[in-house]
Image (spheres, rainbow, N blue to C red):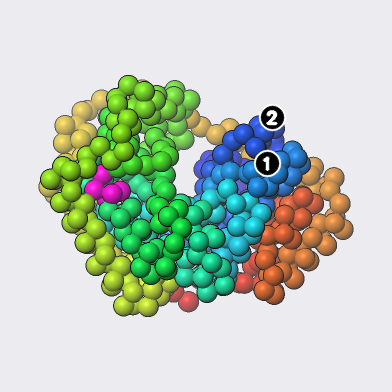
Amino acid sequence: MAAGEVGKAGVAIDTLADFETVFDGIPLNEVSTSMTINAPAVVLLAMYIAVGDKQGVDRAELRGTIQNDIMKEYIARNLFIYPPEPSMRLITDTFAFAADEVPKFNTISISGYHIREAGSTAAQEIAFTLANGIEYVDAAVDAGQDVDEFAPQLSFFFNAHNNIFEEVAKFRAARRLWASIMDERFGAENPKSKQLKFHAQTGGSTLTAQQIENNVVRVGYQALAAVLGGTQSLHTNGKDEALSLPTEQSVRTALRTQQILAHESGVADTIDPLAGSYYVESLTDEVEAEAREIIDDIDERGGMLRAVDSGFVQQRIQDVAFERQQEIEAGERIIVGVNEFEVDEDPEMDLESVDEEDEQRQIERLDEIKADRDDDAVDDALAAVADAAASDANVLPPVIEAVKAYATVQEICDVFRDEFGEYQPGV
């Protein structure tokens, strides 16, 4: 199923050996690592812990974030494996394990980024994202966990689009909303449980294949909006990502965009620099009120799981995306270089490409690992994963032992497939 895709959307990770290569020479007690992984998140977290164990790093010192946000997969990305209920169980197992073993690790990055990429409005992005957050907290509390034990390690991931003031208002509204949700709904007492920590990434869907140099400007303004809105972490896209993986030069320009903002612009010198602006404050109130209304609607529908399962959330996003596309095609919404200010020339572009031989090398590497490992140890470890999945036991400890035996991501996920089944939308 992965034929032709190896290495094209991220690092190819099949076994712990790949993780050992990635982190060779990188002491895990000195870095924080973010991993964009969802349905197999427990496996990748287990690999990270296993590498730390092999380096002799105290688990309590491991820092980082796994995205681990399965709800938005059902909404926007479709990279799910299991049905919602067992997927939520894997997430709450992660919360519980991390609270005891890796307390500095952010066990979820509740993502609005992909919801916005699918076409949502700014208010929908934060409403649907925070509604997902409510679902996760509910699931963890229902599983018997104390909200102040796991909530401080929840994190969020938002998009940064082109309308600077709307984006700033969106980020400010999201922080206010989450603080009130954690206080009023869940009775959180730890101030850290009420803090909305978030990463922002500039909007991939706003990048154009036409006149790609314009994307440098778009990314700069989007990054500015994220900083003004209070992001704790930022990713800036390469100008050529509408066409391919970014080249090294494009990545460097994207990085320099952040560094210029950080060291030359002054925008990071104070917290919430636009606070008190009549326009920003009123727009924040407006976005927050609209998001609250959407969350109330979701509550009336039985919560986010039911709203997603019924297709309500997806339809709301699709309606907005269709309306925006109509506006672009009618010239009512100007996209510079696409439907206005066009040029007839095709500039030469140096695009990144993945060598097809890389895939074959990865296959050969995997074959070698399978040939060298202890098959009996793998079978025993996978059997322990199956036993945990079939019971109420936390799945993380046996998964860690399975990855240490060099079981593959697929082999471990197949154990869960056998126990949980695969999700079939609309069935």
Residue 364: quarter of image: top right
Give neighbour class at mark 1: few <14, some 14-19, many 20+ (Cα, 10 Å): some
* Residue 262 picture location, percent across and down: 37, 27
Give neighbour class at mark 2: few <14, some 14-19, many 20+ (Cα, 10 Å): few
Residue 266: quarter of image: top left
The magenta stretch spans residue 294: no
Q: Which of 201 and 288 is in front in this view?
A: 288
Question: What's the residue type where badge 2 is placed?
Answer: Gly
**Sequence-first tag of 1 and 2:** 1
Q: Of helix, strand and loop, which mostly describes the magenta segment?
A: helix
**Above or below 395: residue 326:** above
Residue at image mark 1 = 19
Magenta range: 168-172
Whether residue 45 sits left or right of residue 74 in the image: it is: right
* Residue 400 picture location, percent across and down: 72, 54
Residue at image mark 2 = 25
C-alpha span from label 1 to label 2: 12 Å
Q: Mark 1 against mark 2, which lies toward the viewer?
A: 2
**Residue at 31% in and 59% down:** 177
**Residue at 27% in and 53% down:** 173
